[in-house]
Amino acid sequence: MSQSEQFASDNYSGVCPQAWKAMEAANRMDEPAYGEDSWTQKAADGLRTLFDTDCDVYFVFNGTAANSLALASIGQSFHSVICHELAHIETDECGGPEYASNGAKLLLGQGENGKLTPESIEHLVTKRTDIHYPKPKALSLTQATEVGTVYTPEELRVIRAVADHHKLNIHMDGARFANAVAALDVHPSEITWKAGVDVLCFSGTKNGLALGEAVVFFNRSLAEDFEWRCKQAGQLASKMRYISAPWCGLLEGDVWLENARHANACAQRLAEGLEGLPGIQLRYPRQVNGVFVEMPEPLQAALRAKGWRFYNFIGGSARLMCSWATTNEQVDRFLSDVRALVS
Ligand SMILES: Cc1ncc(COP(=O)(O)O)c(C=O)c1O
Ligand SMILES: C[C@H](O)[C@H](N)C(=O)O
């Protein structure tokens, strides 16, 4: 399958040139291991500059590890984590968060367009306060959400007020955090620590890296002993520079933001091209790099027969995901195939 036939996932894309160049630069000489290298220092400092705050930064291999270990740093085994019923930590991490925290329970909330509402949070926290109920301790928000929508700074502030009232820490699954920043056109701090987020799992994998997620603790008290947690979980890379150097490639000149803007723009082009075609309607508002459409089954089958790849997610809608590597030509070719099939 060539890149040109897929809208399956931003996880399918290759490494962006800037990250690759930084990887080559890090490959020129030996460097200390286990994060003691100059690239890891540079990448961590770069993220502190980006967020404009003195946060603790750690690099792990993938998003499930980042989410699981970050949540395990917030709550104990007898606690619970409130998340949306469509959250990746619930649907696609194979019990990772529960396992890493030795049993913390996920409490599933609701909300339109994949976003937890303050009311849903309030309900889950207050519906039971007896000793038999796992005590709510953390709130997990996915930004951008699994259905391609974003929490606005104001929505985050309202949720923070509820979290403060119930002494909850906030974890942010930032698998597509860059796309949310690009879509909202805000400074990254506006939708993280200034909105009361305690820890962010910032994905590099979906933003042009081969692998590598940054776990960014804005609430540094939660980061205590996190490196030991990573080591025990097999998430302390000996040659850490091969994760952190590409991160430097993303941070240099805000490549991370350009990659996200491009992916979002491709999704917008796709959504606009699909709008109004017979039998096709958007399932969720297109806000970042994913387009979720209701599409007749025969049309989906015909597109797949032509070699196009995409997942059916979230109630059967087709998810069309764009990445830094998506091209306008690819989008236009898909649209032309769809138009030919529906005419
Ligand atoms: C919303 C979301 N969170 C987290 C992840 C991290 O998953 P992985 O463990 O595959 O890197 C993904 C998928 O890649 C995702 O879509
Ligand atoms: C869902 C799957 O696990 C992956 N996170 C993706 O978005 O493609």
Image (tube, helix red, strand yellow):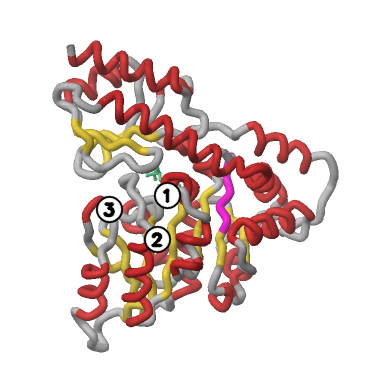
Residue 327 at x, y = what percent? 47, 23
- Judge left or right: residue 301 versus residue 28: left
Kindly report which numbered mark, 1 or 3, lies closer to the viewer in this rendering: 1
Q: Quadrant of the N terminus?
A: top left
Q: Residues within 10 Å of mark 1 (few under 14, many from 20)?
A: some
- Is 161 or 235 nearer to us in this picture? 161
Residue 192 at x, y = what percent? 48, 63
The disc, 1 or 2, on the residue closer to the chain's N-terminal end is 2
Q: Which residue is mark 2?
A: 153
Q: Residue at x 30, y 30 (%)?
A: 271
Q: Secondary structure at mark 3?
A: helix
Query: Marks 1 and 2, how far apart in space?
Result: 9 Å
Q: Residues within 10 Å of mark 2 (few under 14, many from 20)?
A: some
Q: Quadrant of the C terminus?
A: top left
Q: Residue at x 60, y 34 (%)?
A: 16
What amino acid is found at the position of numbered circle 1 in the picture?
Leu
Labelled pair 1, 2 in contact (Cβ < 8 Å) = yes
Chain part drawn in magenta = 210-214
Disc sitting over residue 114 in the figure: 3
Q: Residue at x 42, y 69 (%)?
A: 170
What amino acid is found at the position of numbered circle 2 in the picture?
Pro
Looking at the image, the residue that sits furthest to the bottom is: 131
Does the rendering let one see residue 242? no
Q: Which residue is mark 1?
A: 184
